[in-house]
Image (cartoon, rainbow, N blue to C red):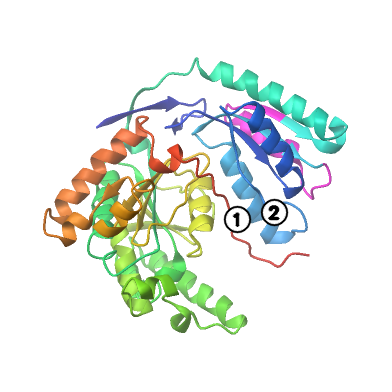
Amino acid sequence: MDIFGYVRADGRIGVRNHVLILPVSYEVNQVADQIVRRVPESVTLRNQHGTNQWGTDLEQTLRVYTGFATHPNIYGVVLLGWGSEPFSVDAIGAAAEAAGKRVGVITLQQSGGMRRAIDEGARLARVFVSEREDAARIPVPLSSIILGTECGGSDACSGISANPALGIVSDLVVKAGGTSILSETTELIGAEHLLANRAATPEIAEQILFIVKRIEQNAMKMGVDLRGAQPAPGNIAGGITTIEEKSLGCIHKAGSAPIVEVIEYAERPTASGLVIMDTPGHDIEQLTGMVAGGAQVVIFTTGRGTPTGCPIAPVIKVSTNSNTFHNMRDNIDMNTGTVIEGIETVAQAGQRLFQLMQHVLSGQMTQAERLHHHEFGIYRIGQSL
């Protein structure tokens, strides 16, 4: 089973060929924006982090930067720094070069100000954009793919139509030798025992129960009981009544494969198969974490029509009901409300979604890409100092 992708120097497979302008602190967001205005073939993101972070919090942020700079969907990257970050921008650039990327590193202070930084960044971006045209898609196996699974704006149909259909896709990717990521730890609450029963080893089962307990305890430190704070108002408006109901619908995304690994936020899986990444339920933060961990594509199911995407990975939007599909046709790639209406079975919808994913992996644009959805957000551990 082949798709068409880009073979990178480090052996990983890209399904997009982006030139990324990556601001590693919020002080240079404006520089990045100006570069992309001059070179619209490149992409960038809005960053809120990079300074006033320390310890494990900073380490997590750096995992995201490195994951994006070395990502297989990236041809070249221009790293932008202010010059007073508490880490080495050059070290991120060195990691990207080791992964075979074309790399430029610019710091505002050393460049002599914003205008010179924009000029140099635009020059590098044009060079990388021109060079990437030499890269060509070739047949590559589906086993090279990491699929990120996500649900946002869930409703009462999520666990009946779109999430089970996505579970079928997840199983097919795993069966082909690829990797599928289940995330959203806050939305595993109440269903963690079912996932633990699917763990490949007793140690993995303990890790699943641990990450759920940890995120509940962290919330309680703020005086919040997640079992009473969820479902969110939008979920309730969509017909979900309890956090357990939401979680039981959420885990359908993971299909039926055994769970072979539990990883921290933005870490790259070391095993092929079904993997759990510990992320919050926040749509953008979990999406950013999975892509930083190497996911080349994300399938995002939604009952309420969540309008989001990612700057470097295609995000396939799947509506759980036909009303949302027709109401937000600009944002949605596929409708599984057909299952609710009895037009097709979950198995048929899953096969249809699998075929759509293959087309997207081989180059077909998603609605989020057409609409230039480039949302980005990093899950913070510590407080800002």
> Which residue is drawn at the image coordinates 39% and 70% (left, top)?
188
In the rendered image, the vertical position of residue 261 relative to residue 217, given as above or below = above
Can residue 232 be seen at all in this image of the molecule? no
* Magenta-tinted stretch: 83-104
Q: Residues within 10 Å of mark 2 (few under 14, many from 20)?
A: some
Q: Amino acid at mark 2?
A: His
The residue that appears at 50% across and 14% down in the rendered structure is 134
Image coords of residue 264 (percent x, y): 52, 58
Residue 294's place in the image compared with 40, above or below, is below
Local secondary structure at mark 2: loop
Q: Toward the viewer: 128 or 33?
A: 33
Asked whether disc 1 touches disc 2, contact meaning CB atoms under 8 Å apart, the reply is yes
User: Residue 123, position in %: x, y?
Assistant: 70, 21
Q: Amino acid at mark 1?
A: Ile
Residue at the spot of label 2: 49
Which quadrant is home to the N terminus?
Answer: top left
76 relative to 255 in the view: left or right = right
Task: Classify 10 Å Cα crowding around label 1: few (below 14), some (14-19), many (20 and above).
Answer: many
Mark number for residue 11? none
Residue 121 placement (x, y as % from top left): 72, 28
At 45% from the left and 84% from the top, the residue drawn is 228
- Residue on which disc 1 sits: 378
Q: What's the residue at 44%, 25% (across, down)?
A: 7
Residue 54 image position (x, y, % from top left): 75, 59
Q: Is residue 85 magenta?
A: yes
- State which quadrant residue 32 falls in: top right
Q: Against 244, is 305 above or below?
A: above
